[in-house]
Image (cartoon, rainbow, N blue to C red):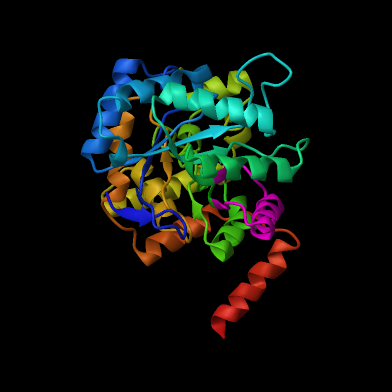
Amino acid sequence: MQFRHLGKTGLKVSDLCLGSMTFGREATEKESFAMLDRFVEAGGNFIDTADVYSTGKSEEIVGRWLRAKRREDFVVATKVRFTMGSGPNDVGLYRKHIMAAVADSLRRLQTDYLDLYQVHAWDPVTPLEETLSTLDELVSRGWVRYLGASNFRGWQLQKALDLARLHAWEPFVCLQPQYNLLCRATEYEIVPVCLQEGLGVIPWSPLRGGWLSGKFRRGMSEPPAETRIAIAEKMGWGESWSRYNTEHTWELIDEVFAVAKQAGKTPAQTAIRWLLQKPGVTAPILGARSMEQLEDNLGASSFELSDEQMRRLDRASAMPVTYPYDEAAEQQQRAGRL
């Protein structure tokens, strides 16, 4: 695995990040420990979790694993925003909840500090000044080293960065958005803000819940049982079969298989590698449910796609762009020719 700076900071993280959303849910503690060990053996040092994953079990599993390791060898990230209880103050990005949540995360992770603390999503109720000043205090106290955001829109991210700059508060240094070959709207405004401001992009769902894993091929009439896509269909999640069972998806998957064959790699490795070679991307987050999936995903760090292969995937994954993004794309193309 290679190492990249997290945005414009001096912190170096592995170019693949191990996500732990499956820990304590699809993966047992024993299986989770094995995946963590394999990730480290492959050269990884970047581990991402959230207080809400498996209602805290994910953090607890990572904490028990981390206890037997040298803490300084790892970059541990977690997130705050969503509910961990049924009380009126158990969700949100206001001072009381953040202060309680960070203390709970530190306890579950069995660590004195968090390398990266991320707000999990925008809070439309709490004043942004309250959120950012509280996060700044966490850094001042030494509980948190760096700050990040997840699932922000472009204007939300820019507003947070501008307010932090105005008040001399610690700024966000990275953003964790959904970004993959089936979700490229992230490139409209979110990625440009990150590039302009020097934030690292840490994409979640690089395989869109499994659609780009190689398990899905044209001609299938339903998702395989027990896959995340099958579960998503029942639960109404965004990666559901009914949402992506389209000609665009199958044309893209056809091209992913073709490029993968040409490169001598698997479809999953090819899809993740495409992300690794996109501007601004620091480390896609691997959300493996098993050691087999993790082994496949880890191979994305060991090769490069050619310029032509990248163009093929760009073309196959392109979606119709409407105003005002169509005019911006045309201006960029004209500027490139000049």
> Up-down: is 212 above or below 256?
above
Q: Is residue 32 above or below residue 285?
A: above
Residue 77, position as x, y percentages in the image: 45, 37
The x and y percentages for residue 145 are: 46, 44
Residue toward you, 304 or 163: 163
Q: Residue at x 52, y 44 (%)?
A: 139
User: Which residue is drawn at the image coordinates 25% and 25% (left, top)?
Assistant: 68
Up-down relation of residue 173 to residue 19 (above or below): below
Residue 57 seen in render: yes
Q: Position of residue 62 (x, y in %)?
A: 37, 25
Image quadrant where residue 309 sits: bottom left
Observer able to see residue 224 = no
Which sits in the foreground, 285 or 119? Answer: 119
Judged from this view, the residue extending furthest toward the front is 141
Whether residue 296 sits left or right of residue 319 in the image: it is left
Residue found at the far left of this picture:
41
Left or right, 201 with respect to 18, comes to right
- Residue 171 lies within the magenta run: yes
Q: Nearer the viewer, residue 234 or 121?
A: 121
> Between residues 168 and 187, which one lies in front from this camera angle?
168
Residue 248 in the image: state x and y as whole percent.
57, 46
The part of the image, by quadrant, that contains residue 269 is: top left
Residues shaded magenta: 148-172
Q: How many marks?
A: 0
Q: Is residue 154 magenta?
A: yes
Quadrant for the C terminus in the image:
bottom right
